Image (spheres, rainbow, N blue to C red):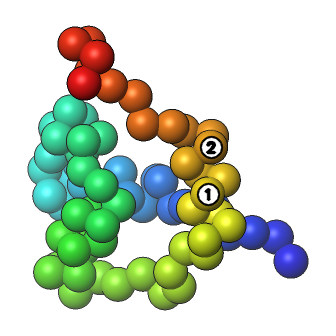
Amino acid sequence: MAEARFPWREAMAFGFGHLRLGPDAFWRMTIRELSAAASAHGLQANDPISRESFSALQAAYPDKGDENGD
């Protein structure tokens, strides 16, 4: 079975179009914050992400500090 990918197109459409967020605000949001905003507008995710998928995302996209090293 193919692993489901995060629906970035839909997330961006919701964040930019519906919430009218600027790119900086959208990309600083956590998935949990975006999910809370979506649920406040009657939208809900079907399935939670698996631990393995989350770990793979963390490895592929590690958190990086800002320009000051924070």
* Rendered residue at 15%/46% (across/down): 21
Question: Would residue 22 be found to the left or right of residue 70 on screen?
Answer: left
Residue 45 pos. (x, y %): 42, 81
Q: Quadrant of residue 61?
A: top right
Q: Nearer the viewer, residue 50 or 22?
A: 50
Q: Secondary structure at mark 2?
A: helix
Q: Which residue is mark 1?
A: 55
* Rendered residue at 50%/80% (across/down): 48
Q: Are marks 1 and 2 in contact (CB under 8 Å)?
A: yes
Q: Which mark is residue 28?
A: none
Amino acid type, mark 2: Ala
- Judged from this view, the residue extending furthest toward the front is 70
Question: Would residue 62 be found to the left or right of residue 12 on screen?
Answer: right
Residue 64 pos. (x, y %): 40, 28
Q: Which mark is residue 59?
A: 2
Residue 58 pos. (x, y %): 55, 48
Q: Residues within 10 Å of mark 1 (few under 14, many from 20)?
A: few
* Rendered residue at 22%/74% (across/down): 36
Q: Is residue 24 above or below residue 57?
A: above
Locate the N terminus by quadrant: bottom right
Q: Nearer the viewer, residue 11 or 62?
A: 62
Residue 19 visible in the picture: yes
Amino acid type, mark 1: Ser
Question: Would residue 37 be found to the left or right of residue 65 on screen?
Answer: left
Q: Is residue 46 above or below residue 21?
A: below
Residue 14 visible in the picture: no
Residue 44 pos. (x, y %): 35, 84
Locate the C terminus by quadrant: top left
